[in-house]
């Protein structure tokens, strides 16, 4: 079972890394925008960072859980994953 949990955790970490790159790109774009657009973009970037932190916090107990217990923790982690993914997608679409 540990292998299944480890694969799940690695998949989430890989996705977080991709979104970190997306957040960095958005932040870079913000630096090139006018004052109003830059302020709005920074607000979105801060929201993304908060969602990322929430996901990382939910992932910690999954990594430490033994046996089948990690399965019980997946629900909250998956919700945080979806929330961050949706927010990154929305921000990327809005600030093309």
Image (cartoon, rainbow, N blue to C red):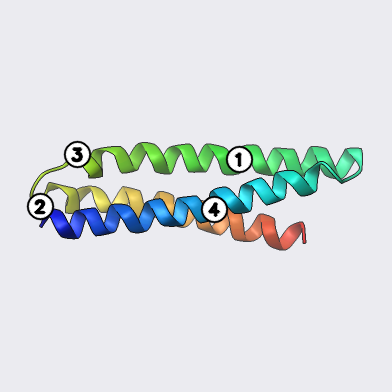
Q: Position of residue 9 (x, y in %)?
A: 29, 52
Between label 3 and label 2, give the one nearer the viewer: 3
Residue for badge 2: 68
Which image quadrant is residue 4 in?
A: bottom left
Disc 2 is placed on an element classified as loop
> Disc 3 marks which residue?
64
Q: Which mark is residue 47?
A: 1
Between the C-alphas of marks 4 and 1, the distance is 13 Å
The image position of residue 33, as x and y in percent, is 87, 46
In the rendered image, the vertical position of residue 78 relative to residue 60, given as above or below: below
The Cα atoms of the two marked residues, 3 and 2, are separated by: 11 Å
For label 1, the SS is: helix
Lateral position of residue 5 relative to residue 37, left or right? left
- Find the distance from the CA under tag 2 to the CA under tag 4: 28 Å
**Whole-Å distance between the Cαs marked 1 and 2?**
32 Å
Going from the N terminus, do you reach mark 1 or mark 3 first? 1
What residue lies at 18% left-to-right and 49% top-to-bottom?
70
Residue 76 location, x and y as percent? 32, 48
Q: Are marks 1 and 3 in contact (CB under 8 Å)?
A: no
Q: Earlier in the sequence, mark 2 or mark 4?
A: 4
Q: Quadrant of residue 93?
A: bottom right
């Amino acid at each position: 079972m540990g292998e299944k949990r480890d694969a799940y955790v690695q998949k989430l970490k890989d996705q977080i890394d991709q979104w970190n790159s997306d957040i960095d790109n958005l932040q870079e774009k913000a630096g090139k925008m006018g004052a109003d657009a830059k302020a709005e973009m920074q607000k979105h970037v801060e929201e993304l960072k908060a969602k990322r932190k929430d996901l990382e916090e939910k992932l910690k107990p999954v990594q430490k859980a033994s046996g089948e217990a990690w399965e019980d923790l997946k629900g909250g982690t998956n919700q945080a994953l979806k929330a961050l993914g949706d927010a990154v997608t929305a921000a990327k679409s809005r600030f093309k």
